[in-house]
Image (tube, grey):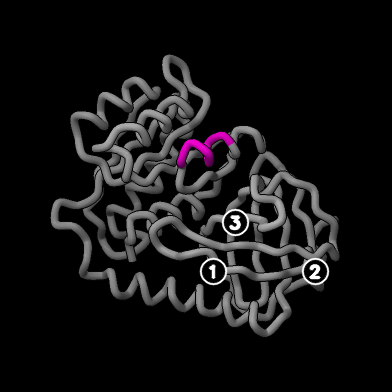
Amino acid sequence: MNRGSDDKRDEPRVPLVLRVQFPNQERMVAVTENLSKGGIFVQTDRTFTPGQELGLALSFPGLMNPVQVVGTVAWVRPASEDAPGGVGIRVVRDQDRQRLGEILSSAGQTRASDRTALPAEGYRVLIVEDNPHIVEMYSYVLKKLASGELAGKVPLEVHFSPDGHHALQALRSTQFSLVMTDLYMPVMDGFALIERIRAEEPLKSIPVVAISAGGPEARERAMQLGVDIYLRKPVRFQEVLETVKQLLHIP
């Protein structure tokens, strides 16, 4: 079932990326694409039925402890070449709408309070990806962020590695603020890279975003190894931007 024209939200939607866990199904982990006080869109390749009630735990590493809400599946977006599949979830209980409102308000306040808190030396992001076309897209997003076209100008350097082996060498020699990695690469794949990062004391606290076309098994394995956020390809411009801004606390 696709979203019907009569299924529109009254409240404005905000492109906010949060980790989603289903309390009754602990191994199911997804991310939000946007939120409003009245609903959530969750990217997922799992099958849900319109009208089905879902309990969700929304969180973000280092930024927000889990917040529990209950909603009903309102519509389903099938996966396509342009976007991963997902479900629109309508939230009607007053206490849950209030919780979503608090999340949205808190996100705005955090960004405002961090406007003068950017590190003097700036941020350094490492992108680990062997597909040059995807590298170009990520680079485009981050360079726009650094240039000030999308927000206030942010001191940001973007570095690239074609596989986990080269990435590990870079991480051991240079201090990075964030790693964005594919999972399926030659020489050393992203799974092995994440495992090494989380095992080495100087590296273990670096935020890691995995961006992959892998299915539920890949997501579950990546989350178990310690990624902070898992985004499913094809990933949208706004998802990359919002995830980077949230993990680096960029206003």
**37 w.r.t. 204: above or below:** below
**First of labels 1, 2 by sequence position:** 2
Q: Which mark is residue 14?
A: 1
10 Å crowding of disc 2: few (<14), some (14-19), many (20+): few
Residue occupying the point 67% across, 76% down: 38
Mark linked to residue 5: 2
Q: Identify the disc placed on residue 86.
A: none
Tell me where residue 103 appears, x and y as whole percent: 50, 73
Q: Is 65 placed above or below 196 here?
A: below
What is the CA distance from the residue labelled 3 to the residue labelled 1?
16 Å
Residue 61: image location, x then y, percent: 43, 56
Q: Residue furthest bottom?
A: 94
Task: Please tell me in which quadrant of the rendered image residue 50 appears.
Answer: bottom right
Dot in front, 3 or 2? 3
Q: Residue furthest top?
A: 187
Residue type pointed to by label 2:
Ser
Q: Earlier in the sequence, mark 3 or mark 1?
A: 1
* Residue type at the position of mark 3: Val
Question: Which residues are the magenta region?
Answer: 221-226
For label 3, the SS is strand
Q: Residues within 10 Å of mark 1 (few under 14, many from 20)?
A: few
User: CA separation, marks 1 and 2?
Assistant: 19 Å
- The residue that mark 3 highlights is 20
The amino acid pointed to by label 1 is Val
Nearer the observer, 168 or 17: 168
Q: Quadrant of the N terminus?
A: bottom right
Q: What x and y, as percent, mark residue 67?
A: 56, 68
Tell me, yes or no, whether the highlighted magenta stretch contains residue 74: no
Give the camera-side residue of 28 and 24: 24
Q: Nearer the viewer, residue 121 or 175?
A: 175
